[in-house]
Amino acid sequence: MKTHTLIIILLSCSCLLLNAQESLKPYQDPSKPVDERVDDLIARLTLNEKVKMMKHESPAIPRLGIPAYDWWNEALHGVARTSEKVTVYPQAIGMAATFDTEAVRKMGDYTASEGRALFNEDLKAGKTGTRYRGLTYWTPNINIFRDPRWGRGQETYGEDPYLTGMMGSAIVEGLEGDDPFYLKAVAAAKHFAVHSGPEYNRHSFDARSNLYDLWDTYLPAFHQLVVQAKVHGIMCAYNRYEGQPCCGNDELLTNILRNQWGFDGYVTSDCWGVSDFTSYHKTHANDIEAAIDAVLSGTDLECGNTYHLLEQAVNLGFISEKDINVSLRRLLTILYKLGFFDPQVKNPYSEISRDVLECKEHKQHAYEMAQKSIVLLKNDNQILPLDKKEIKKIALIGPNADNPQTQLANYFGEPTENITPLMSLKNRFKDKIEVQYFKGVNIMSHIEGAPSPAQLTTKVADADVIVFVGGISADYEGEAGDAGADGYGAFVSGDRSTIALPKVQTDLMKELKKTGKPLVLVNMSGSIMSFEWESQHANAIVQAWYGGQASGDAIVDVLFGDYNPAGRMPLTTYISEEDLPPFEDYSMANRTYRYFNGEVRYPFGHGLSYTTFEYSKPKSPTLIHTGETISVETTVKNTGARDGDEVVQLYIIHPKNGNRPVPNCALKGFKRISLKKGESKTISFVLTPKELSMTDEKGNLIHSAGDVQIYIGGGQPKHSVGEFVDLKMEGEPFVVY
């Protein structure tokens, strides 16, 4: 009897389920393929509704159950611009300095969790459509930091295409998740393409490069994210490329991105970038022509105010509704993959709650990434780490010693707790070490009424060590409109005209040096400083970037040896801006470590440690055929007295061949490893034809016969401890792409 009753109940439930499914429209039915659902929904939309959904502020369409949605959100180094308290990680350039892709991937995953928690909360409350609360993040910025004067370079992963591609891929994988169907969030690689300043004229600038530089420098990271990491979003750049606005550029968006690389995600304009076609580039007679050209070139979504004109354009016959449907199909596919039209029970990310905001694991990871990002540039006579038993009084001076805002950089969220170096020293040592703090100077100016440099020097003369925490901040370097504080001629719309530390800070350190006490410089910045005086006279220099909410604790850990620094420079430290080509010249000749031929202060890949490492001769085939993949391995030993991390770097050196462009060397592999004192580890790298190839003058990547050298060490060849191995390649040219 009981079995019979159960069967009746199950049959009844099955019938109810079948009836419920039958009542669903195809676009609402999660059992149907996404393409079918998208096409069904498009067929039900009016032209007016379609056009409205192609703008970043997409309104609700109640008759079809479509919620409002704002596509604009930011997550450069943690969820940004929200009123909630969230975890803030080091700025992107600091993350690049970790040379740790797994740490970056985890940061992306944690950031997506915090963003999902906020979105889920809004969804349950019926409050979708709020800016900076969506799941489509306009990050990462994978433009090449080709010139250290560019203020937005801090948002990137440095000057090297390979490092940028690996770091960018890691954050995409973290943000988008690993579910086979649903996306945790959506990343958008930006700014496509050939975009890296200057800021003051970015809305009208025409970037020009030859095909070699385009494919050798400006496109590889985008290729990596599109083809390998399968990023679902792209943001096109403000500027023109070779005379055509990037958001209406047929070569970039249609030929390369869609046709050659097979990108099937969505493309968004940078904000109000389509309006630039008419207002600044002067390439189009009016906004309706600009909107049409942008859509036909492949810009699916507009952040701005011209796409409403598309309805008129269709009615006048200038563009077809089928063209509108192409872009709308891409946008709706993204929303379906985010789970917008499905029962929440089907979405593995729908139950993420606000418990994850600033949770223990996330804060710990922000702390560890801040530690890993720090680069020890100089350490004369091993003045660092400081001995806690010997230091009785420390003089802490400088404009960034207690400036929490500097640590957050740009595109930031707000953490509950943001620890500065002063706060960390006081919390940690309390009565054990006296901390004598003076701001001393502002970033660019003297402080009215404060002690003069000479007076300050007298006040700190009895300190055991002087730690000067200086640099700049996102008030001075950054995006046009966000940065550009009064910089006494040194800053223009967020860019820099000099790579020197602000003179007022150097002048103060010159006075402090007269005390005869050890002088340690901790520098916070989003780019390099030339350190002309500092490199000669400071006893130690620590590059701390903009380290996020745990900056102070990470810095103090390094100063006192609680953490052994292993960060590496993702940029070349030039001796002077006089060594650089004009800022607006996009040729890579004499730029970055790959093509610069002069002397440098600190090379790309440089970073000191409190221990030492030894490398064995790499084991590798000595002869291969073009098109083959090889494995190369080496053993690294910690030969010093402390545990520590080492960043093992692999570079390829191709011989010079006439006037053909050839990099001095090129990073093609890296791994960050931890070694206890005396410990050894064997590290292997897989080199595919892609890593062993060179770009020809037409932009093709070709694996050709010839001789190459492989170098594995703790930095670049000639600048680090490491070993070479020779490799001969033979056979017909193999075209990678």
Image (cartoon, rainbow, N blue to C red):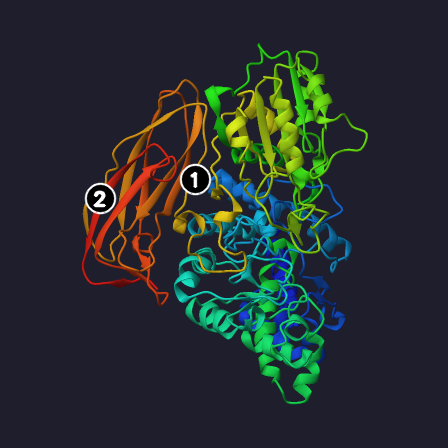
Q: Amino acid at mark 2?
A: Asp
Asked whether 432 or 347 is in front, the reply is 432
Mark 2 to mark 1 CA distance (whole Å): 22 Å
Q: Amino acid at mark 1?
A: Gly
Q: Is residue 351 visible?
A: no
Q: Where is residue 519 shown, x and y percent of the image? A: 58, 23
Residue in the image at 66% along x and 27% along y: 421
Asked whether, in this view, residue 643 is left or right of residue 38, the answer is left
Where is mark 1, residue-wise?
Answer: 605
Asked whether 541 or 54 is in front, the reply is 541
* Crowd band around label 1 with a 10 angstrom C-alpha radius: few (<14), some (14–19), many (20+): many
Asked whether, in this view, residue 291 is left or right of residue 568, the answer is right
Q: Are marks 2 and 1 in contact (CB under 8 Å)?
A: no
Mark 1 secondary-structure assignment: loop
Q: Where is residue 401 shown, x and y percent of the image? A: 68, 29
Quadrant in which the C terminus is drawn:
bottom left
Q: Is residue 464 visible?
A: yes
Q: Where is residue 340 shown, x and y percent of the image? A: 65, 61
Residue 259 circle label: none
Q: Where is residue 510 shown, x and y percent of the image? A: 61, 27
Q: Quadrant of residue 266?
A: bottom right
In the rendered image of this protein, does residue 269 appear above or below residue 729? below
Where is mark 2, residue-wise?
Answer: 726
